[in-house]
Amino acid sequence: MADFETLGERLAAHGVSRRAFVKYASWLGSMMALTPAASRAMAEGLAKARRQSVIWLSFQECTGCTESITRSFGPTLEDLIFDFISLDYHHTLMAASGEAIEHARHQAMEANKGKYIVAVDGAIPLGLDGMYSATAGESNLETLKATCKDAFAIISIGTCAAYGGIPKASPNPTGAVSVGDIVKDKPIINIPGCPPIPEAMTGTIAHLLAFGKIPELDHLGRPKAFFGDNIHDRCYRRPYYERGQFAKSFDDEGARNGWCLYEVGCKGPITYNACATTKWNAGVSFPIQSGHGCLGCSEPDFWDKGSFYTPLSGSIGPTAKLVGGAALAGAVAGVAAAAVARSRKSSLKKG
């Protein structure tokens, strides 16, 4: 791609009409809960955008985040790499190896000083002076600090980078920490999940390209467009919850009828993510739709908060606690009894 070429010019050269591009931008904007005017502004911004240099660092992780983004539906990974960004460094996806790829990283940092984006997946170990994980003789800690020094912004990809994730789980033998625990002087966007939804990653990058600024974030540094609502509020099983119809196990009549998975440990009420709306694999499904309760993987310390199959208390919200089945049954029974009492009272008044 020529240095002077914008994304709009590039797409036009490939036969993509303005109408098709505006339609795509409208879809992307609606997915991010933008107004029609903002969606048009996104289309204009993307059309004028030039290729954005991105350096992707992989630390203490399982490669699940990279696996996830390769399954992105819109834009696809190919579109993202060849039309939206210049992915100048990524261990897993680069064909080169050794000194060549480290040279590519330093070259990208120098050529795009103050303008490049750093994407990080994986936690950073501080134990043994950072040598639990190293690349090219350099600890993850040293690589992170050096690479972020002249970056425009940092995107923490996945729960490990955003909060420390599974590497940080008790007893945390490597002394793992999040990106935010290390980098204090740059804007950081957290896109948690184990792994994150592909469109949350690509949509965030598209927002940066279109508007040249950080999207609106919540108190945990997550884009509100994807993490503004909890899964419980958007879950299609919510009506069963309201009626008190709960699966008691993963193979009982309630489970087969698609009832609420609250009593088998679903963490949807305290988990903020777009799983119930954007879903996975091009919108095909998400864990609850597939019959398994939410694990709460986009929340801090999800691994240490108790069994995935221990239900929450009767309260809904950030203060909900893990309790035993008997306590939950009592809470549900109390809610049901109160509802019956209100119904009888209403009937007597009408009579």
Image (tube, grey):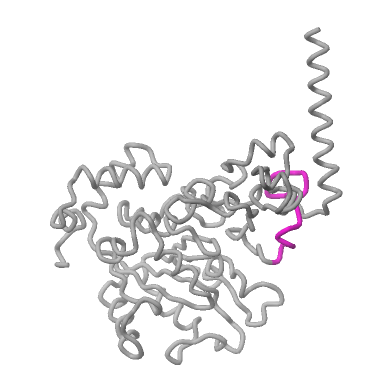
Q: Residue 135 or 76: which is nearer the viewer?
A: 76
The percent position of residue 312, horizontal first and vertical second, equals: 75, 51
**Side of 11 where 189 appears, left or right:** right
Q: Please report the residue visible at 67 percent of the width from the left and 72 percent of the height from the top.
A: 169
Extent of the magenta region: 304-320
The percent position of residue 97, horizontal first and vertical second, equals: 34, 87
- Image quadrant holding the N terminus, namely bottom left
- Determine if the magenta segment contains residue 55: no
Image quarter for residue 167?
bottom right
**From the viewer's perspective, is residue 336 above or below residue 145?**
above
**From the viewer's perspective, is residue 152 above or below residue 319?**
below
Q: Residue 141 or 96: which is nearer the viewer?
A: 96
Q: Please report the residue visible at 45 percent of the width from the left and 78 percent of the height from the top.
A: 145
**From the viewer's perspective, is residue 201 above or below residue 18?**
below
**Side of 270 where 192 appears, left or right:** left
What main secondary structure does the magenta stretch of the protein show? loop
- Determine if the magenta segment contains residue 313: yes
